[in-house]
């Protein structure tokens, strides 16, 4: 059990409950959280008692993406830092996809950026509160999408909608996310935990080998795309993070102002 970490893990009745645990930072992802998330997912891989994984976020938001204050503090060293952060994030996404156990994500508040939005796209089931909101956000700060969203999102919503979502960065309310196929179910906010737990319990009662095989078959259609696309995505994110526009984008988010991009 991880009980004092930026990601908490407990296993009960075949359900592994992972909780992102930086509520004061909207569960923004830094290296410590990403490293622990990987360790927790690996623990789920290695535990034969785990039949389903439920991923949630503590506090008001599921995950606001990368920790922009942490990123901005790296200055000229940001590309090197993001190479490591992106490697951990992509590893987490790959682990989620390749886990035999189905993965459920429950979303309240914002699921944004590579962290929140990317984990949503990599999940097998997504239960969203009716007040939840989704935002890609990468190009808004002069960056490129990560966490595999350049590969998974078009499969979920189609090329035209993926282009709109990733290039124009709309804030997508839960009802629209359901209509797009981004989430599985929308429930009243006060029923989110109950609905996610009920789905997890139902899956935990299923035939584990049959569920694992079916999940593998469904993901295999984009398996080659994911395995090939993740390295290219990581290279692009690292390259863009060294630009003046990326630094301006992060500063604008922190300063709560509109960015002024120069193409440098």
Image: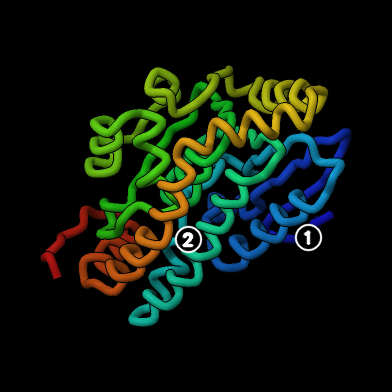
Q: Whole-Å distance between the Cαs marked 1 and 2?
A: 20 Å
Mark 1 is surrounded, within 10 Å at the Cα level, by few (under 14), some (14 to 19) or many (20 or more) other residues, namely few
Which residue in the structure is indicated by mark 2?
A: 67
The residue pinned by badge 1 equals: 4
Q: Position of residue 114 (x, y in %)?
A: 44, 51
Q: Indicate the position of residue 178 as horizontal and vertical percent values.
A: 44, 21
Q: Position of residue 227 (x, y in %)?
A: 47, 53
Decide which of tag 1 and tag 2 comes sooner along the chain.
Answer: 1
Q: Is residue 242 left or right of residue 151?
A: left
Q: Is residue 122 above or below residue 192?
A: below
Residue 190 horizontal side relative to residue 49, left or right: left
Q: Residue at x 29, y 43 (%)?
A: 166
Query: Picture quarter containing residue 142?
Result: bottom left
Is 50 in front, or is 218? 218
Q: The N terminus appears in which quarter of the rendering? A: bottom right
- Tell me the SS state at disc 2: loop
């Amino acid at each position: 059990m991880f009980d004092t970490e930026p990601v908490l893990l407990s296993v009960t009745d075949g359900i592994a409950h992972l909780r992102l645990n930086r509520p004061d930072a909207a569960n923004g992802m830094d290296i410590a959280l990403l490293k622990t998330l990987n360790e927790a997912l690996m623990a789920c891989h290695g535990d034969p008692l785990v039949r389903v994984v439920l991923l949630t976020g503590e506090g008001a938001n599921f995950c606001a993406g990368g920790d922009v204050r942490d990123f901005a503090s790296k200055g000229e060293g940001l590309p090197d830092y993001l190479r490591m952060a992106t490697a951990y994030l992509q590893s987490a996404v790959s682990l989620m996809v390749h886990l035999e156990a189905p993965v459920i994500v429950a979303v309240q508040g914002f699921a944004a950026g590579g962290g929140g939005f990317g984990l949503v796209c990599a999940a097998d089931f997504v239960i969203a509160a009716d007040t939840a909101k989704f935002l890609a956000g990468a190009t808004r700060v002069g960056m490129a999408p990560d966490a595999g969203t350049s590969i998974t999102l078009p499969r979920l919503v189609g090329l035209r909608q993926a282009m709109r979502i990733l290039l124009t960065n709309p804030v997508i309310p839960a009802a629209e996310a359901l209509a797009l196929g981004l989430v599985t179910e929308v429930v009243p906010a006060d029923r989110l935990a109950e609905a996610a737990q009920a789905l997890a319990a139902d899956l935990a009662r299923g035939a584990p080998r049959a569920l694992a095989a079916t999940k593998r078959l469904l993901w295999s259609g984009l398996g080659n795309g994911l395995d090939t696309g993740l390295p290219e995505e990581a290279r692009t994110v690292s390259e863009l993070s060294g630009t003046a526009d990326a630094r301006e984008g992060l500063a604008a988010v922190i300063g709560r102002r509109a960015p002024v991009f120069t193409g440098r």
